[in-house]
């Protein structure tokens, strides 16, 4: 049952029992969002709205709204028990009514607060909550949901399109240029299907007052922002994405929240959502409040929030923002601005326990649901198993890889040989986590330049650099994430105030970049070798990681079953490498290497340097391998080949033959020495 409706869609009575209050106080009431907030209800034959709010330190709470002329005395609420939950049924109130909670603090102050559990909010700059009903939407994504729950996403392709709804595209007739979720669904689904992304990560969906925060300073955790429509409009967007085979990940922000007067800060006159000690409850750099993870009701608020989006809106995962700021008590703080834990350390023990609780409940109940940590340090076992020493996330953003990639690709090619190991370093720790390789919005703002303008050289060089860089990304172990616009070569930095520069698709370089990224996405999804084994050396092998002089990298990707492997060869300089020799695995010495992708083709914006469509290995030793291939490698060019590797038995027998042969040579040599 949802809210005040039974299985037949008939209105029922909503009330908060002693059991509800007890479970909430123990952080185990995972349906609390069906009780707190505003819900259609029927009492004594009268239909209306039941309001519930947690305000343990309030001396009195009233419901005020458009239905009572904002009369501050018309509807006092009743305190239901020692936990501090207040309730009130008001007959005759339906959906679409604005309301707030008028909280009288113990010192007499009057606080006008939006509902922390509201499902809909007034369009900014308005700050009222709006009554609504989440029942009645007809979902058509049953097949998607059933299939999702049966997948192990660590072994599936994941190519994520990070998207900010308000600036993806502007509607000429929309309010402030915003698309409604329903109209936006058509535009987004069309693009994602064309490009072959598997998931979309939506920024700024949780209600927030300031556009410039990009949705990372939240006031309404239980409401999709009204900038783009009503809650059922957002349901429509998710439904359409699922029907198109695209998963939906939400940016989720449990690290901190906005300090706006109508929000969670000092909600009942005292700090109930944040820690009362500012050294634990405030971010000095961000000007935000930090949740008190040691408070059970706060933990319940956050964990139930994830389940709310999962159950009511069918989202497939969350990307958890700023995890490092939660794990470290001294994050972004100077001496004297933080308090050590009980052992004298900087680790936030309560946040650690919160993450374990969150992932055990959410992922333990819904194994197909993704929890992704944006964690920027070397904290161990972020994606460790649930119930173990780890935090239990499905994936961790590989921020180290992102930093190394951007720093290397920005270099003038003449200096790249001095930083050659920057691009190989990430594989040295790849086995320790389940990683996503992110090139996110954070990398294309605040004077960091767009991805294409990070690249050195003239315009044509920039695009060639980015093509070879993206090829490295798609070949490297780890799932993929690209921020919107970077797949067609957006040249300006991103701004939430304007749409992407779609007009650039009239230019050859941008047409070529879009076509190339689409080809990479198709390749990625077509070959299990590129995604099935991302956390083990069984899925990745360097052919040559040490050619710093030429700044060329070559490696092989493998799947667990079948023998179709891919060979990547990447030239990071603007110099053509003729007859460049690449070692090949022993199991492929008698196999043909068929070209799948050449980044220098004219259709991608390249110069049209050709690479042989099929190359046979030659018995010429290279980098410790007996066989190798030779190819003309274009300047700033990438080549991807597919080949079949011999079965393990055949490879094993060859190794034995080789060992026996070597042994015979050694015996003859020893015999000569004996003579």
Image (spheres, grey):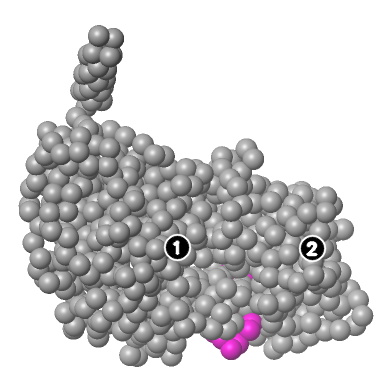
The stretch of residues the image draws in magenta is 118-128
Residue 667 location (% of width, % of height)? 26, 13
Q: Residue at left 61%, top 43%?
A: 390
Find numbered disc 1 in the image and state the secondary structure of the residue it sits on.
Answer: helix
Find numbered disc 2 in the image and state the secondary structure of the residue it sits on.
Answer: strand
Residue 7 location (% of width, % of height)? 52, 51
Query: Residue tagged by mark 2?
Result: 85
Quadrant occupied by the C terminus: top left
Which mark lies nearer to you, 2 or 1? Answer: 1
Q: Determine which quarter of the picture holds residue 470.
A: bottom left
Q: Residue at left 30%, top 59%?
A: 549
Residue farthest toward the front in the current orientation of the protein: 675
Badge count: 2
Crowding at mark 1 (Cα within 10 Å: few <14, some 14-19, many 20+): some
Q: Is residue 362 above or below residue 570?
A: above
Q: Is residue 591 above or below residue 147?
A: above
Query: Residue tagged by mark 1?
Result: 404
Q: Which of 464/52 is in front?
A: 464
User: How far, Cα to Cα, is label 2 from label 1?
Assistant: 50 Å
Residue 617 location (% of width, % of height)? 12, 40
């Amino acid at each position: 049952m949802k809210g005040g409706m039974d299985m037949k869609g008939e209105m029922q009575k909503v009330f908060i029992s002693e059991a509800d209050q007890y479970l909430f106080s123990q952080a185990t009431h995972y349906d609390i969002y069906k009780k707190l907030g505003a819900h259609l209800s029927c009492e004594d034959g009268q239909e209306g709205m039941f309001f519930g709010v947690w305000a343990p330190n309030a001396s009195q709470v009233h419901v005020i709204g458009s239905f009572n002329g904002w009369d501050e005395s018309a509807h006092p609420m009743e305190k239901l028990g020692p936990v501090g939950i207040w309730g009130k049924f008001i007959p005759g109130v339906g959906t679409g009514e604005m309301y707030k909670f008028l909280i009288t603090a113990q010192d007499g102050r009057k606080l006008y607060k939006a509902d922390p559990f509201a499902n809909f909010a007034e369009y900014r700059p308005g700050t009222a909550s709006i009554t609504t009903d989440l029942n009645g939407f007809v979902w058509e994504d049953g097949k998607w949901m059933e299939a999702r729950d049966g997948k192990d996403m660590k072994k599936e392709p994941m190519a994520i399109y990070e998207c900010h709804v308000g600036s993806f595209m502007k509607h000429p007739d929309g309010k402030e240029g915003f698309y409604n979720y329903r109209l936006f669904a058509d535009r987004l689904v069309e693009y994602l299907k064309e490009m072959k992304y598997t998931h979309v990560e939506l920024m700024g969906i949780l209600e927030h007052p300031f556009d410039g925060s990009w949705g990372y300073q939240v006031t309404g955790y239980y409401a999709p922002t009204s900038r783009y429509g009503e809650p059922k409009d957002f349901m429509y967007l998710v439904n359409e994405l699922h029907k198109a085979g695209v998963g939906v990940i939400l940016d989720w922000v449990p690290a901190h929240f906005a300090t706006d007067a109508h929000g969670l800060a000092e909600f009942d006159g005292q700090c109930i959502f944040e820690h009362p000690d500012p050294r634990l409850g405030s971010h000095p750099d961000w000007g935000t409040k930090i949740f008190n993870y040691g408070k059970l009701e706060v933990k319940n608020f956050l964990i139930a929030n994830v389940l709310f989006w999962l159950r009511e809106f069918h989202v497939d995962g969350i990307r958890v923002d700023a995890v490092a700021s939660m794990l470290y008590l001294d994050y972004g703080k100077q001496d004297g601005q933080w308090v050590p834990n009980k052992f004298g350390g900087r680790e936030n023990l309560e946040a650690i326990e919160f993450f374990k609780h969150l992932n055990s409940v959410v992922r333990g109940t819904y194994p197909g649901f993704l929890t992704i940590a944006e964690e920027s340090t070397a904290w161990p076992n972020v994606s460790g198993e649930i119930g173990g020493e780890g935090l239990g996330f499905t994936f961790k953003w590989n921020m180290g890889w992102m930093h190394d990639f951007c720093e290397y690709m920005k270099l003038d090619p003449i200096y790249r040989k001095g930083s050659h190991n920057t691009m190989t370093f990430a594989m040295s720790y790849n086995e320790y986590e389940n990683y996503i390789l992110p090139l996110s919005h954070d990398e294309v703002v605040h004077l960091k330049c767009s991805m294409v303008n990070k690249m050195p050289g003239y315009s044509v060089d920039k695009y060639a650099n980015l093509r070879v860089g993206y090829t490295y990304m798609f070949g490297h172990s780890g799932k993929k994430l690209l921020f919107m616009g970077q797949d067609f070569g957006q040249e300006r930095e991103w701004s939430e105030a304007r749409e992407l520069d779609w007009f650039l698709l009239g230019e050859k370089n941008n047409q070529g970049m879009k076509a190339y990224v689409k080809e990479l996405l198709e390749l990625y999804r077509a070959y299990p070798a590129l995604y099935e084994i991302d956390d083990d050396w069984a899925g990745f092998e360097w052919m040559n990681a040490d050619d710093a002089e030429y700044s060329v990298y070559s490696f092989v990707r493998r799947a667990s079953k079948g023998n179709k492997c891919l060979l990547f060869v990447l030239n990071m300089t603007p110099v053509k490498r003729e007859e460049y020799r690449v070692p090949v695995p022993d199991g492929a010495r008698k196999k043909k290497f068929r070209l799948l992708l050449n980044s220098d083709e004219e259709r991608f914006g390249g110069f049209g340097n050709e690479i042989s469509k099929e190359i046979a290995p030659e018995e010429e030793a290279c980098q410790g391998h007996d066989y190798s291939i030779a190819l003309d490698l274009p300047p700033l060019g990438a080549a991807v080949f597919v080949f079949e590797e011999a079965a393990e038995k055949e490879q094993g027998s060859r190794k034995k033959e080789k060992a026996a042969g070597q042994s015979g040579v050694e015996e003859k040599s020893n015999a000569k020495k004996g003579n």
